[in-house]
Image (cartoon, rainbow, N blue to C red):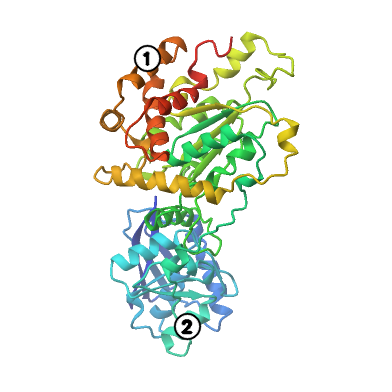
């Protein structure tokens, strides 16, 4: 007897339907074909114990299982439930004429209970696209899969529940989630709020500009100046995610298995990897490719604390994803693309001792040591960071001030208003949503300067010895400052403020 049951494999952030064919014949043996990995090959032991503990038998026949398409590598333990249901139907222990209308996925424990799987959301999206009636999966993953409307999503706790469903005995009901209600559950009281930060008004202004235009930013200052504290609060002033962004972000976290019984993600991610991170962990990859930190930060913030402490080759692999806003991982037999459109926030000490430019502390680093320290960050990487700002320690008077500072919610209102202007501006341009994504052509079109502004920028370039790479960045940032002012044109005050935010471009900054 031949039975077909359907599962799914996830490659990148997309799913591919897998047909599991189970054939019973005379003889004894268990043959699993179709490029399964070791976790799938071991499944026969888990399935045999789970069937026995739930009142069924692992048939003493020749069982041939094919996982089609046979040339596609399958990995992980999430096919246990698919295989178990195929064996039960194929050996006539249960009747399930409708089983071919469902996608079935789940890892079995020896007692028949189910363990969570990865990639439930992309699998549910694919199941709906291909016209399946429903999707059975572990109850821990049901919230993320139930985001997909028009598909019956059943959260199952153990093997017995799904068997009873097909036998017509169970009371299993599909999980229904109102996606829009879930999405609009916004947090107006973020965990990290700008109202906690005393002083640093100029840095807060800089952060507001970075958030409004999606600009990458680097904070340079001595230890204890508040760089990390400020960086942790950037995501609290970013505009709320759109429904499309929320689905994209949830999909990536679903594939990485990081959702932990959460439905739709409505908060922008904030990722802060340690400086010992490897290339693969940062950009993604591995023998079975998984999304890296830059993809986990998609539509959110990637914070790199103490930037020069990261290995140079790790930072260099970020250059292409920062430009293209996606990362492509190529292997001999397949290529996977993960989205990685994130806002980079970096921080660093200005010197190995950390106290360069601090008048109250002696500078113990020689010019050669400082040059070597700064050279860990390459010019091409700095080229992709729009805003450089120096952070100075907060004086005692500001620290002791009892007055409440402006909250993240108030700043976010201004940021959101500026983003709405940009969304309208770029609505006809594909893959451009905010100022930081502007190409040279768009900069020439939307960053037109009047004569006083041109003269000011020319003088600044000559007097401060600003590099050519700073020119485009200044124009982009000034466009964002103009948007925050609700000004259609860029004026000289916008250019003047943008010029301040290029500390590392000034020649002799180390001298």
Left or right: residue 226 compared with residue 118: right
For this orientation, the residue located farthest to the left is: 428
For this orientation, the residue located farthest to the bottom is: 169
Question: For the point 41% across and 10% down, which residue is it?
Answer: 462
Q: Nearer the viewer, residue 254 or 237?
A: 237
All told, the count of numbered labels is: 2
Question: For the point 54% across and 46% down, which residue is it?
Answer: 270
- Residue 334 visible in the snapshot: no
From the image, tell me which residue sits under label 1: 458
Which comes before the other along the chain, label 1 or label 2? Answer: 2
- Residue 198 visible in the snapshot: yes
Find residue 490 and report its horizontal and vertical position in percent: 35, 30
Question: Disc 1 on helix, strand or loop?
Answer: helix
Question: Disc 2 on helix, strand or loop?
Answer: loop
**Image mark for residue 185:** none
Find residue 510 and report its horizontal and vertical position in percent: 58, 13
From the image, tell me which residue sits under label 2: 172
Can you say which quadrant of the picture contains the C terminus? Answer: top right
Can you say which quadrant of the picture contains the N terminus? Answer: bottom left
Categorize mark 2 by other alpha carbons within 10 Å: few (<14), some (14-19), many (20+): some
Find residue 47 and report its horizontal and vertical position in percent: 52, 71
- How far separated are the C-alphas under marks 1 and 2? 71 Å
Find residue 146 and report its horizontal and vertical position in percent: 43, 69
Q: Quadrant of residue 303?
A: top right
Q: Nearer the viewer, residue 463 or 42?
A: 463
Question: For the point 47% across and 24% down, which residue is it?
Answer: 382
């Amino acid at each position: 007897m031949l039975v077909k049951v359907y599962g799914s494999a996830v490659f990148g952030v997309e799913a591919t339907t897998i047909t599991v064919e189970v054939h019973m014949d005379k003889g004894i043996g268990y043959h699993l074909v179709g490029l399964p990995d070791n976790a799938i090959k071991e499944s026969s032991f888990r399935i045999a114990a789970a069937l026995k503990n739930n009142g069924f038998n692992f048939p003493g026949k020749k069982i041939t299982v094919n996982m089609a398409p046979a040339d596609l590598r399958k990995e992980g333990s999430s096919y246990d439930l698919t295989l178990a249901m195929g064996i039960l139907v194929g050996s006539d222990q249960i009747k399930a004429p409708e089983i071919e209308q469902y996608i079935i996925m789940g890892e079995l424990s020896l007692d028949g209970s189910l363990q969570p799987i990865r990639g439930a959301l992309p699998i549910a999206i694919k199941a709906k696209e291909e016209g399946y009636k429903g999707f059975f999966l572990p109850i821990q993953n049901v919230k993320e899969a139930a985001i997909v409307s028009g598909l019956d999503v059943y959260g199952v706790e153990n093997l017995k529940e799904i068997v009873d469903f097909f036998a017509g005995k169970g009371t299993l009901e599909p999980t229904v989630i109102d996606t829009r209600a879930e999405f609009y559950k916004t947090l107006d009281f973020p965990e990290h709020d700008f109202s906690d930060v005393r002083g640093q008004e100029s840095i807060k202004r800089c952060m507001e500009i970075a958030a409004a235009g999606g600009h990458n930013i680097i904070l340079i200052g001595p230890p204890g100046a508040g760089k990390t504290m400020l960086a942790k609060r950037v995501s609290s002033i970013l505009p709320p995610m759109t429904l499309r962004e929320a689905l994209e972000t949830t999909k990536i976290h679903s594939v990485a298995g990081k959702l932990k019984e959460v439905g739709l993600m409505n908060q922008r991610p904030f990722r802060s990897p340690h400086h010992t991170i490897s290339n693969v962990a940062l950009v993604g990859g591995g023998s079975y490719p998984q999304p890296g930190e830059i993809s986990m930060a998609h539509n959110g913030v990637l914070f790199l604390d103490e930037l020069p402490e990261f290995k140079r080759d790790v930072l260099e692999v970020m250059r292409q994803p920062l430009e293209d806003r996606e990362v492509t991982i190529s292997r001999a037999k397949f290529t996977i693309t993960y989205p990685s459109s994130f806002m980079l926030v970096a921080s660093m000490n200005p010197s190995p001792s950390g106290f360069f430019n601090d008048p109250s502390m002696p500078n113990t680093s020689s010019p050669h040591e400082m040059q070597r320290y700064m050279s860990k960050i390459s010019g091409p990487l700095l080229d992709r960071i729009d805003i450089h700002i120096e952070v100075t320690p907060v004086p005692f008077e500001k620290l002791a001030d009892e007055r409440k500072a402006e909250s993240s919610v108030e700043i976010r209102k201004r940021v959101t208003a500026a983003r709405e202007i940009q969304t309208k501006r770029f609505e006809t341009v594909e893959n451009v949503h905010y100022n930081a994504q502007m190409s040279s052509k768009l900069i020439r079109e939307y960053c037109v300067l009047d004569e006083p502004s041109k003269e000011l920028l020319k003088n600044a370039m000559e007097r401060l010895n600003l590099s050519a790479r700073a020119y485009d960045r200044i124009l982009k940032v000034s466009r964002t400052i103009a948007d925050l002012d609700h000004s259609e044109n860029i004026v000289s005050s916008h250019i003047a403020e943008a010029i301040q935010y290029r500390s590392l471009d000034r020649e002799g900054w180390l001298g």
